[in-house]
Amino acid sequence: MDDQSSPYPKDSYHSGNICPGVDSSTTSVHVTALDGIVNVNSLFTVAVFVGLSLATPNQRSLENRVSCDAGNDVAKNLLVFEVVSFSFFLFSSLVAQGLKLAINLLNSKDVDEVFRAHINLKVLRFGMMGSALGSVLGCVFLVLSMIDVIQIRLGLLSCGSNSTVHSVTVLVLLVSSALLVYISTVFYAFLH
């Protein structure tokens, strides 16, 4: 029987597919998407630690009015939001890394491979959705923590300082619109 007449592709056993109907170019796209999630989460994690290092309790704001200085409650909120944000980014990155590991093991070409991962498309899709959700929630808490950093450095929002209000407004508008695009894209990819 020659290769042309065979109903199955040559080396179909070694194709490395996650499940039937998913080709290796699709898994390459998944790995690239997961790499992107991990890389972005790493950058956001750095922002978490920068936010923590820039804001200390009982720090005077640049507004130069004692009534505009943030109290310990804002500093506590900052710490809580930073830790929660870090937790979501870490969750998202670990899920993405686990999925990448499974895909890479599946795509291994070695026949004698002792360890083989078995993952189906539903697990991959829900894992990617969970990772994306972790990133979105991490961003939400990062924005909340950045609002606290702005209040500590520039003065409380309740004081009505132009710099504080403008900074918070720009931060919330830009990040919210970017998250809306990200969430829409993730749902579109999940449903199609």
Image (tube, rainbow, N blue to C red):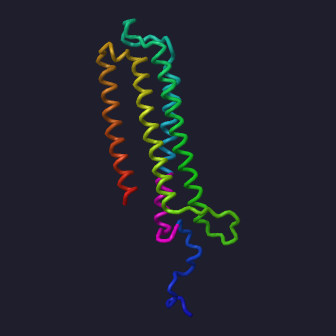
Q: 185 and 166: which one is in front?
A: 185
**Residue found at the far bottom of this picture:** 1
What residue is rendered at 43% in x and 36% in y? 139
Residue 33, given in percent of the width and then of the height, sits at: 46, 53
Residue 23 is one of the magenta-drawn residues: yes
Residue 144 image offset from top left, x and y in percent: 41, 28
Say which quadrant the N terminus sits in: bottom right
Characterize the magenta stretch by its predominant secondary structure. Answer: helix
Which residue is depicted at the point 52% across and 83% down? 8
- Magenta segment range? 19-34
Name which residue lies at 51% across and 26% down. 80
Placement of the C terminus among the 4 image quadrants: bottom left
Residue 87, compared with residue 27, is above or below; it is above
Residue 188 drawn above or below residue 44: below
Q: Position of residue 140 (x, y in %)?
A: 41, 34
146 lies left or right of 174: right
Residue 176, image x, y percentages: 34, 37
Find out whether residue 135 is within the magenta segment. Answer: no
The residue sitting at the top extreme is 66
Residue at image location 55% in from the left, 72% down from the top:
15
Query: Tag count in the figure?
Result: 0
